[in-house]
Image (cartoon, rainbow, N blue to C red):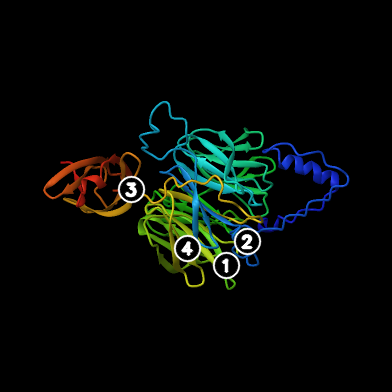
Amino acid sequence: MRWIERFHRPRLSRAATAAAAVVAVGLTGALPAASSAQAEPPPRPAVRQAPALPGAQPISPNDRVYTADQDSNTVSVIDPKTNTVLGTIPLGKSRMDTDANILGPMYDGQIDVHGLGFSRDGRYLNVVDVTTNTVHVIDTATNKVVRTIYVGRAPHEGFFSPDGRQVWVAVRGQDYVAVIDWRKNKVVDQIRTEDGPSKVVFSPEGRRAYVNHLRAQVLDVIDVASHRVIKRVPIPARAGGSSDEAISPDGKEIWLGMPNNGRTTAILDARTYRVTAVLNTGPRTNHPNFVTVKGVNYAYQTVGDLNQTLVYRRSTSGGPPTLVKRIHNHGAAPHGIWPSPDNTRVYVALQKSDAVDVIDTRTTKVIDTMRIGQYPMALVYVARNSAGSTDNLSRQGLGMRVANLPLDVQGVPGVATANVRALPGLDEIVIDARGLPPNREFTVYGVRGRTTTALLSAHSTSMGGIPEALAYVHFFANHYDKVVLRPVR
């Protein structure tokens, strides 16, 4: 049975129902003792979570789209029925907030909100903070953090286990998956993997977990019941390390996004563990996901440095997919991506535009763009079967200035961009470049009239790129006309 169909609850006796209810409300307090005269509560209607095969429920005002906003340290909350940004859940102060002294030794909030997952019944959201090594569990009905658990160095992405009892998180700064009993607020197991595990996804029926790696050319396959790695699948060296992954709703394919090798997605057969294709998708390939439209299965792949989301028609014979559309996003650096359960919409986080694109899957066109929190990374769509609220939401990170500027590369070949956003205190400038001479030192300058001011220095990699070099400056207040990149002589 597919995991998207697993929310039909079995009928319970009254005693079992009462016992289950006590466990369910353990986060908020004790229930009064059940009496024999009490009627059984009506069962919750089933929901199917995306990515889903056809037949799932339509978009509902109960549903929510969430983004993990790394610079404002928030989770943005969106009503997908109306494409309305309801507010943000703050988990720490914004970067460079001078009042909070976020870089000082007394700061005790979270930094670099980055990864997202959810329980299959839609009741809980898990959020990962990369720099403060934190995993939160949020009640989606109230937008309140109900658990905060600390794990190892630089966790990246995680997900609730199929039964909802645990959160499995890839601890990318080390070499293991942390298994968290979130109700008991503790890590109960560490499953050793290759170096740099990046994300955990579960197979549709829930028996297997798949872990990709940023610093190892391998996909680990874990037996969920025993917590044991049962297969290590080698990935071709040309594919590079993988930052994100997704499994198709039919359980047949695993797609791995490779951001740092320049241009690759790898596709594996989830039944034979054979690599069936390596695609040249483009520089800074990010997250994949899946939809089915009019009986045809598609994969969507975000490509950050092209500002495009690619649409592939998946093969019915096990061969490589066919590129059918390049969707030009209405902003810069598409990153996280998730469809609605009914396969009619795809939502894309625009990392460098602080926005979310909404794509109509029948026309493969962007039909709406919403401004959200700052520097969104992961994005998930969570279907719910009861009404949510706007309680406990803030406006932190919303409505802040952001700009994407071309860099004038002088003296050497190459192309580069500058992403600038206003933060409380100082502005952040992030430089991305490619096609430069390798292993060279460069300086970035802000130019205003005849005045040139050095903003930051950076080194190109062995592949001639400068990925996400950043600095904090007074950029907008100085009214720079352009930004220049020059090699250090």
> Is label 3 in a helix, a strand or a loop?
strand
From the image, tell me which residue sits under label 1: 292
Q: Which mark is residue 218?
A: none
From the image, tell me which residue sits under label 3: 421
Quadrant into which the C terminus falls: top left
Callout count: 4
Q: Considering only order in the chain, which callout, 1 or 3, is on the residue closer to the N terminus?
A: 1
Of the two numbered discs 3 and 2 in the rendering, the one whose residue sits closer to the viewer: 3
In this view of the protein, can residue 216 be seen by the observer? no
Report x, y in % for residue 157: 52, 44
Query: Badge 3: few (under 14), some or many (20 or more) residues near its Cα, within 10 Å?
Result: many
Report x, y in % for residue 130: 47, 39
Q: Which mark is residue 250?
A: 2
From the image, tell me which residue sits under label 4: 358
> Is label 1 in a helix, a strand or a loop?
strand
Q: Residue furthest top?
A: 105
Q: Are marks 1 and 4 in contact (CB under 8 Å)?
A: no
Report x, y in % for residue 229: 62, 41
Q: Nearer the viewer, residue 371 or 150?
A: 371
Q: CA distance from mark 4 to mark 3?
A: 22 Å
The residue under the point 57% across, 34% down is 149
Report x, y in % for residue 470: 31, 42
Q: Nearer the viewer, residue 162 or 218?
A: 162
Q: Considering only order in the chain, which callout, 2 or 3, is on the residue closer to the N terminus?
A: 2
> Is label 2 in a helix, a strand or a loop?
loop
Amino acid under disc 1: Thr
Amino acid under disc 4: Val
Q: Nearer the viewer, residue 167 or 478?
A: 478
Of the two numbered discs 1 and 2 in the rendering, the one whose residue sits closer to the viewer: 1
Q: Are marks 4 and 3 in contact (CB under 8 Å)?
A: no
In screen coordinates, is 341 left or right of 456? right
Q: Considering only order in the chain, which callout, 4 or 1, is on the residue closer to the N terminus?
A: 1
